[in-house]
Image: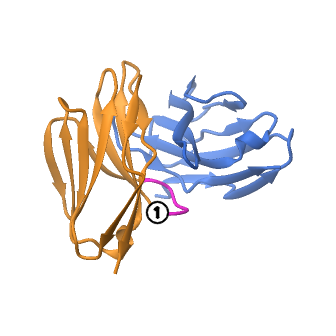
Amino acid sequence: NAGVTQTPKFQVLKTGQSMTLQCAQDMNHEYMSWYRQDPGMGLRLIHYSVGAGITDQGEVPNGYNVSRSTTEDFPLRLLSAAPSQTSVYFCASSTGTQTYEQYFGPGTRLTVT
Amino acid sequence: GQNIDQPTEMTATEGAIVQINCTYQTSGFNGLFWYQQHAGEAPTFLSYNVLDGLEEKGRFSSFLSRSKGYSYLLLKELQMKDSASYLCAALAGNNRKLIWGLGTSLAVNP
């Protein structure tokens, strides 16, 4: 099993550009989530999904969209990148709700100039 | 409000024992997680406590006191590879969201 994979590993965007961060898991996990991690802020939940076709907002959803058309994939879209979105983005999955151990992807390091 | 507190930094010596504390204030507490995160890498799961008491897993143990809103992670026989950030997270509320601490950066010196 590859576990949770994320692409790209690094990305530089200009302000106003859009892009999609990819996340896939091959563990048949129902629950998937996106976090951002910033120095001094800890991990913050952006969006999450409890199954295909179901998504919900986390703590910091503004400026981001998600969709979950399959169990395996959970892409995160930045609609119009802003410097405040410079961060490390982690995708995670688990078998159930957040009660269960979460498996994190390797992260995407995004810089917006 | 909901809050998690843990020390920012700790230093210990190889072979020693270190205890990393975490206090939490949450509504609808449903359990406490510990994750390890090496620099530049993703967090990895260490432990989950939902009942009071000590859970031991090899060199790592985790303790929970629900009445005191307190947990600790105990690392024994420290190795250099244990140098990492240790994240405490509480599962809280009816919607069972994770509240993350900022992490404790542990440096293990020879």
Quadrant housing residue B59: bottom left
Which residue of the protein is positioned furthest toward the bottom in this rendering? B110
Quadrant housing residue A106: bottom right
* Residue in front for this viewpoint, B71 or A99: B71
Kindly indicate which chain is depicted in orange in the rendered structure: B
Res A71 visible: no
Horizontally, is B29 left or right of B5 in the view? left
Query: Chain A is which colour?
Result: blue
What range is drawn magenta here? B38-43
Horizontally, is B91 left or right of B61 in the view? right
Q: Amino acid at mark 1?
A: His
Mark 1, secondary structure of its residue: loop
Please state the horizontal and vertical placement of residue A75, each as a whole percent of the image.
65, 40
Please state the horizontal and vertical placement of residue B46, each as a whole percent of the image.
31, 53
Few, some or many residues within 10 Å of mark 1 (<14, 14–19, 20+): some
Report the residue at 50% width, 58% height from top. Answer: A2
Please state the horizontal and vertical placement of residue B83, each as a whole percent of the image.
39, 68
Is A101 part of what is drawn in magenta?
no
Horizontally, is B77 left or right of A33 in the view? left
Please state the horizontal and vertical placement of residue A51, each as a whole percent of the image.
50, 29
Residue that badge 1 annotates = B38
